[in-house]
Image: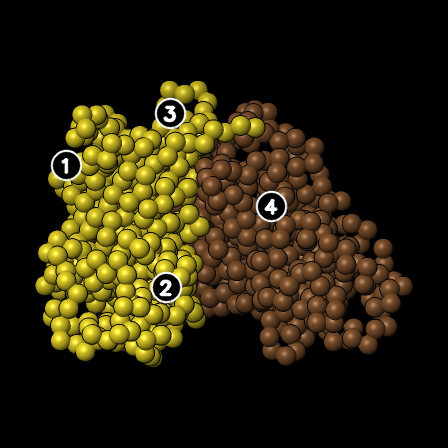
Chain colours: A brown, B yellow
């Protein structure tokens, strides 16, 4: 299917994509939107023009209430958009059409959902193994629970921002093995984490659970997610209750939520789970439990020059998204529409497929050479981190950039 | 100061208290409210009757927007309420007054704030020591970071409910030291945690922080908080990212938020912090850094018979609430109005001042005798846990009960 709106071959936003975002429209208000090529389409304006009449939730500033409507509604809206924007549609020449579109550069994105709770998993075996080797025991890098359950923890919703929002290097406590007492100051081990997140539809509220078989019915869509980390702060604080200030200062989310439906032709198998076999509530046919989303991390130095420092793939997760959802809700924990679950850092087996500076520089021992001639162990002020991701479905199904610059720490004074 | 509404000597709701809650009013809608003795006063109805004219935020269903107005607003509303309800006020005989009041039993409470993010600390030294002795190393029970920073983690907002909401025993994975592989089923180590929480006013959003000196300006008020815990689930899952499904199935909050101002005559000193001295951003004059709030936990068996199993005090915290806030925000983490920070289990030095069954029964090795003739190591289905707390300020300043019953687990099936 082709749209009358032109789409360049390298565009993330083919006509099969039709992702979701919230944007600041020309009148200054927030509109929910989709995109074809370089054109952003306001769903609110389309409704004012007589389209999408059954979905008043699309007039709101976030997708939360629309997500409540469920997969059939999401699919129906996509079908209406395809019908309106396909080649040959009468809408192409409708006088009201111009009011519904603008160039993507004129519609800056804001957060598309109100995120009630954000949880972060640790679902890549290679990442968990690498961290275990560096910080705990190289001989027993994976902790005993790791192959039995998708380890996860709760993160901070208040500091999740959309691509383009600067991140400030945090102050905090750290204590290296040679420091007699902890020291205070800006983190000296600033890192990114390459993750994929899912935006969820709410689940039961009666202390029951979402089964692994039905879990994907709760995936509204996918985002790229940079879980910024201050490794030195994290390492000192994290026992016994987990990461806190080393993570909760900032996370960056891609502006576009790629819908579950758009990625249906990009399914792939997941790694077998036989030794050990998970408990029954986590058992899942692995033949199409994963997604083939190509991922990359680019590091741009202050001069704007980019070096791609990692190429990974969401198929590198050991625990699937369905398993993450099933595990998260097995105890009756309530999932609300708009909640975010992120995968944890997605690292592959190759040295250039690692999803964090911690792993790429092996905790600072192996500097990375960048195209501007400099090198990095961790991030420096003025660096910009860009995550990109794409699948194929006829055309390219991409997320746009998940981009943020790192600014210098604020100077603490009493 | 005395009100024309009678207050019995043992009432939690003396005229000095004037706590905040949201209740379901006789017309079915949610009203923000306060309370004197057994009478609930609707702030929305008072506004309709011409009182509290400057505070339209009190017409809403949560306090979040009113909290944004800041301490002077909170204090001004208290002063207006005292003026209207003091003995001798003309309001006593005003015909509109009856529309603004009802008996507390006719106004069931709902959650008084929309909680964006909930964080839980671990601020009682005795509790952290006890847990460290049981699960890690009795000789080095406190981990190296504990005396340097208030250890905390993020919890789940979606499953915080108000007193009176039943809790269902969660299913989950556990693996004891003698189990060859993890087993699945209802938790067999159900526990409460006696905590005090604070409801916060939002802080800076520009990556700066709230200083320890100004931290208390961000405390709207205090609640009792039961951080229900499934110890067996928690123990198996918690490395390395902290508690998750062992906690996030339910937390119970007292209906009444006791205001910061009402507790100003209940300040007390905190334990000295000299070995080690905290870093400067956490240093605080300890002479009145804490609150003297008497706490108790009662366990009611299914026949309704109560046994008080613990008596503690919020002064048993090592890290003050101001230190918790200052630490939480030192990295630029954004605090929003309505956010909740809880203290962690508040245990004292005496054997009957421990704030969890885990500690009271020493992980199941010392059963507790109850008044109905039965005994407990952990909680049984049908048990009800009631937290109570009170300070004195002329009359009693209490929270009402933080009460919830434990129901049997739902039966999992594929």
Please provide percent x and percent y for residue A106: 68, 75
Give the structural element (helix, strand or loop) at label 4.
helix
Q: Chain of mark 4?
A: A
Calculate the distance from the C-alpha at mark 2 to the C-alpha at mark 4.
33 Å
Do discs 2 and 3 belong to a common subunit?
A: yes
Judged left or right of residue B80, residue A282 is right
Q: Chain of mark 2?
A: B
Marker disc for residue B176: 3
Give the structural element (helix, strand or loop) at label 1.
helix
Calculate the distance from the C-alpha at mark 1 to the C-alpha at mark 2.
42 Å
The answer to whether mark 1 and mark 2 are in CB contact below 8 A is no
Q: Chain of mark 3?
A: B
Q: Nearer the viewer, residue B120 or B69?
A: B69
Identify the residue under disc 1: B351
The picture quadrant where one finds residue B87 is: bottom left
Give the structural element (helix, strand or loop) at label 3.
loop
Q: Residues within 10 Å of mark 4 (few under 14, many from 20)?
A: many
Calculate the distance from the C-alpha at mark 4 to the C-alpha at mark 3.
33 Å
Identify the residue under disc 4: A218
- First reached walking from the N terminus: tag 2 or tag 3: 2
Give the structural element (helix, strand or loop) at label 2.
strand
Identify the residue under disc 2: B31
Q: Nearer the viewer's eye, disc 2 or disc 4?
A: 2
Q: Nearer the viewer, residue B387 or A200?
A: B387
Calculate the distance from the C-alpha at mark 1 to the C-alpha at mark 3.
26 Å
Task: Please give the name of the residue rendered at 56% of the width and 28% of the height, measured from the top-left corner.
Answer: B414
Residue B185 vertical position relative to residue B55 in the rendered view, above or below = above
């Amino acid at each position: 299917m082709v749209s009358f709106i032109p789409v360049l071959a390298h565009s993330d936003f083919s006509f099969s994509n039709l992702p979701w975002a919230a944007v600041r429209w020309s009148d200054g208000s927030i509109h929910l939107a989709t995109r074809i090529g370089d054109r952003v389409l306001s769903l609110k304006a389309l409704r004012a023009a007589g389209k999408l009449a059954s979905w008043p939730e699309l007039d709101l500033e976030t997708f939360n209430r629309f997500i409540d409507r469920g997969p059939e509604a999401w699919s129906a809206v996509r079908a209406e958009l395809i019908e309106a924007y396909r080649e040959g549609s009468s809408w192409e020449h409708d006088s009201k059409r111009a009011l519904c579109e603008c160039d993507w550069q004129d519609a800056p994105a804001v957060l598309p959902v109100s995120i009630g709770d954000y949880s972060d998993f640790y679902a890549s075996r290679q990442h968990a193994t690498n961290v275990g080797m560096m910080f705990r025991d190289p001989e027993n890098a994976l902790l005993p629970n790791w192959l039995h359950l998708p380890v996860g923890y709760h993160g901070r919703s208040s500091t999740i921002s959309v691509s383009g929002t600067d991140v400030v290097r945090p102050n905090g406590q750290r204590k290296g093995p040679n420091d007699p007492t902890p020291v205070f100051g800006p983190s000296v081990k600033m890192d990114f984490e390459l993750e994929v997140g899912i935006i969820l539809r709410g689940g039961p509220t009666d202390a029951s659970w979402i089964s692994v078989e039905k879990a994907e019915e709760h995936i509204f869509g996918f985002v790229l997610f940079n879980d910024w980390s201050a490794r030195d702060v994290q390492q000192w604080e994290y026992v016994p209750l987990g990461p806190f200030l080393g993570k909760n200062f900032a996370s960056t989310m891609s502006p576009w939520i790629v819908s579950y439906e758009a990625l249906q032709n990009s399914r792939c198998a997941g790694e077998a789970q036989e030794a050990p076999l998970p408990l029954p509530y986590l058992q899942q046919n692995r033949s199409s439990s994963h997604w083939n989303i190509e991922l990359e991390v680019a590091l741009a130095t202050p001069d704007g020059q980019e070096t791609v420092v990692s190429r990974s793939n969401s198929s590198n997760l050991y625990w699937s998204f369905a398993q993450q959802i099933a595990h998260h809700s097995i105890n009756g924990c309530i999932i609300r529409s708009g909640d975010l679950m992120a995968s944890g850092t997605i690292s592959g087996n190759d040295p250039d497929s690692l999803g964090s500076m911690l792993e790429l520089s092996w905790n600072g021992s192996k500097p990375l050479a960048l195209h501007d001639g400099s090198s990095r162990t961790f991030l420096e002020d003025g660096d910009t981190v860009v995550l990109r991701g794409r699948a194929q479905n006829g055309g390219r199904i991409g997320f746009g950039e998940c981009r943020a610059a790192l600014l210098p720490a604020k100077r603490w004074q009493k």
